[in-house]
Image: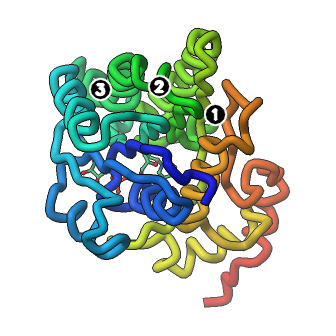
Amino acid sequence: MRHQGHIAVVTGGAQGIGAGIVEVLHKNGAKVAIIDRQRDKALKLSCDISGDDGAITVIEADISDKPGCEYALQQVIDRFGAVDILVNNAALARNKDYIGKLSDSDWADQSKLTIEAVTNLSEIALPYLQRSKCPAIVNVSSVTATKIAQNQASWPYHVSKAGLEQLTRYLAVKLGQSNIRVNAVAPGLVDRSEGVKLTDFKSNQQVISHVVPLNRVATASDIGEAVSFLSSQEASFITGQVLVVDGGMGIAEVFGAGLSILESLDFSN
Ligand SMILES: NC(=O)c1ccc[n+]([C@@H]2O[C@H](COP(=O)([O-])OP(=O)(O)OC[C@H]3O[C@@H](n4cnc5c(N)ncnc54)[C@H](O)[C@@H]3O)[C@@H](O)[C@H]2O)c1
């Protein structure tokens, strides 16, 4: 119960990784405010996790602009009266297969959540975090912040996550004077609880077994546990860091892994 008495805010907590973060923070004693556009989905999650004990509250809001962020944070304060932990998890990807195809509005959309909402929510939450005994911000980045492949249409997302990691370091330096720690987690491959899963495809499983030393993808709870640690007092002297949660995928030597995948392929039919 490392978060007993703490108020946590999780953006994009209605599904996927955000839902895993909500679940772990709640399990560890936090009261959690889910900020999400998907009210019904968030309400169902809240009910599944905590029934109607009031430990999880749902705030339906669109945080893609500053008024939306202000509204959402005010709702948190009205319901819980404080913020100890801010988890900036909501994100989207604008995929374009070449730089020339990305419009100005694609760029704006790409950075609205990953950069602007994180900046806005951190600023709006600041007076409350300053009053907290255990303030922490955790941003959800991605291993794609430092990786890229040829023909990767998700490159704008990678660029925005790289920006988010630098924003994390800036905020850590700036807010350290107020004893507010700011870190990020960088998930690798994740199978969320809904939708098409990476592991639904046999070819993906084969690749995973060659490039992920722990031989599986992460669950949303794996990421939730890392977020919970970084926002807890056990991480009280850790700030400005990016914790990679990828089952060791990042240490795989690309050429060797590629060769071993090729060697495992059966070309006989
Ligand atoms: N899924 C992966 O494999 C993976 C890997 C690495 C990093 N990540 C990162 O993890 C985070 C969560 O990823 P996911 O796959 O679970 O995402 P997801 O798309 O499944 O969920 C995102 C949630 O954010 C909410 N949301 C989107 N825009 C919003 C807005 N403007 N205002 C309020 N809520 C909004 C959505 O309603 C949704 O509930 C993201 O930051 C993503 O970049 C994901």
Front disc: 2 or 1: 2
Residue 246 picture quarter: bottom right
Task: Find out if the beta carbon at label 2 lies less than 8 Å from the nearest ligand 1 atom.
Answer: no
The disc label shown at residue 146, or none:
1
- Residue shown at 33% from the left, 26% from the top: 117
For the residues labelled 3 and 1, the Cα–Cα distance comes to: 20 Å
Q: CA distance from mark 2 to mark 3?
A: 23 Å
- For the point 58% across and 14% down, the residue is 178
Q: Position of residue 131 (x, y in %)?
A: 47, 23
Residue 189 in picture, x, y percent from top left? 57, 59
Say which quarter of the image contains residue 43: bottom left
At 36% across and 41% down in the image, what residue appears?
91
Q: Camera-side residue: 27 or 61?
A: 27
Q: Which mark is residue 82?
A: none
Q: Nearer the viewer, residue 129 or 211?
A: 129
Q: Earlier in the sequence, mark 2 or mark 3?
A: 3
Whether the residue carrying mark 3 lies under 8 Å from ligand 1 is answered with yes
Q: How many C-alpha atoms fall within 10 Å of the one at disc 3: few (<14), some, or many (≥20)?
A: many
Secondary structure beneath label 1: loop
At label 1, the amino acid type is Thr
Q: Gap in Å between the C-alphas at discs 2 and 1?
A: 30 Å
Badge 3 marks a residue whose secondary structure is helix
Measured along the vertical axis of the image, is residue 73 above or below residue 45? above
Q: Amino acid at mark 2?
A: Leu
Instruction: Give the residue number, with chain letter if any, for mark 3.
Output: 112
Quadrant containing the C terminus is bottom right
Mark 2 Cα shell of 10 Å, populated few (<14), some (14-19), many (≥20): many
Q: Which residue is mark 2?
A: 129
Name which residue type carries label 3: Lys
Few, some or many C-alpha atoms within 10 Å of disc 1 (few <14, some 14-19, many ≥20)? few
Q: Is residue 99 in sight in this rendering?
A: no
